[in-house]
Image: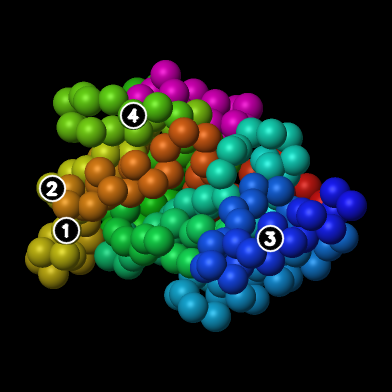
Amino acid sequence: MKLNRLLFICLLLSLFGFTLQYSQLPRGLSNEAWLNQQTTLIQAQTNIDKNVLRLALQAYSHAQKQGVITRPLLTVIDYSKPSSEKRLWVFDLSSRKILFNTWVSHGKNSGGAKALSFSNAPGSLKSSIGVFVTDLTYMGGNGYSLRIKGLERGINDNAFRRDIVFHGARYVNPDNIKKYGQVGRSWGCPAVRVDMAKSLINTIKNKTLVFAYYPDQKWLTNSRYLAG
């Protein structure tokens, strides 16, 4: 009886244009099938590399099972692409919609137009790769900013105390790309355009997943978020 009542409520919600958000993987669907389904449906509407997307979804699946995240949002940064390309995406996995696709900076000591070197060390002025969870917002020297916590020991777990945060930066803009072939570089933070920083931060704040990719074989082989 309770099941029938729940189905009836769901039907009414759908008839009136509501959609149910989910943060858990659908029951009855294997993890592999879910990965294939999500990858295929999202890939069809974006320019993200299919293998990077699949790895990000795999990390999301592990984080969701561990209770690390609270909402079905996934931010992907592909540091294998040059900063002149829009290499940051935010996906709403409940609707499979792309909420943002924009430019993002890397650390000044990570490389020039392309990031080639990454670090977990304080003072390195390099970006970090791996799996992160977003935390709280604050007003700082770079304006409205969003703290993130690295979830991978030895890879990015110093991100919080390194003040690696999302923030807006005037050096992230199309004019710099036209003039220099790249956006400006940060001290390791994933900085975005000033005019979209607040909207992006408010969308992904408070325990959503961030996946920062680079084809580092040691990380790809050993990350517990990419296992299985």
Q: Which mark is residue 137?
A: 4
Q: Are marks 1 and 2 in contact (CB under 8 Å)?
A: yes
Q: Count neighbours of disc 4 (C-alpha within 10 A) and say few if under 14, some if 14 to 19, many if 20 or more.
A: some
As measured in the structure, the alpha-carbon distance from the residue carrying label 1 to the one carrying label 4 is 23 Å
Q: Is residue 139 above or below residue 93?
A: above
Farthest residue toward the bottom? 44
Q: Is residue 6 left or right of residue 107?
A: right
As measured in the structure, the alpha-carbon distance from the residue carrying label 3 to the one carrying label 4 is 34 Å
Circle 3 — which element?
helix
Q: Is residue 121 left or right of residue 59?
A: left
Residue at image position (64%, 70%) is: 39
Camera-nearest label, 3 or 2:
3
Q: Are marks 1 and 3 in contact (CB under 8 Å)?
A: no
Residue at image position (17%, 52%) is: 195
Residue at image position (85%, 49%) is: 2
Q: Is residue 222 visible?
A: no
Q: Count neighbours of disc 1 (C-alpha within 10 A) and say few if under 14, some if 14 to 19, many if 20 or more.
A: many
Q: Is residue 155 left or right of residue 108?
A: right
Q: Quadrant of residue 31?
A: bottom right
Q: Which residue is mark 2?
A: 170
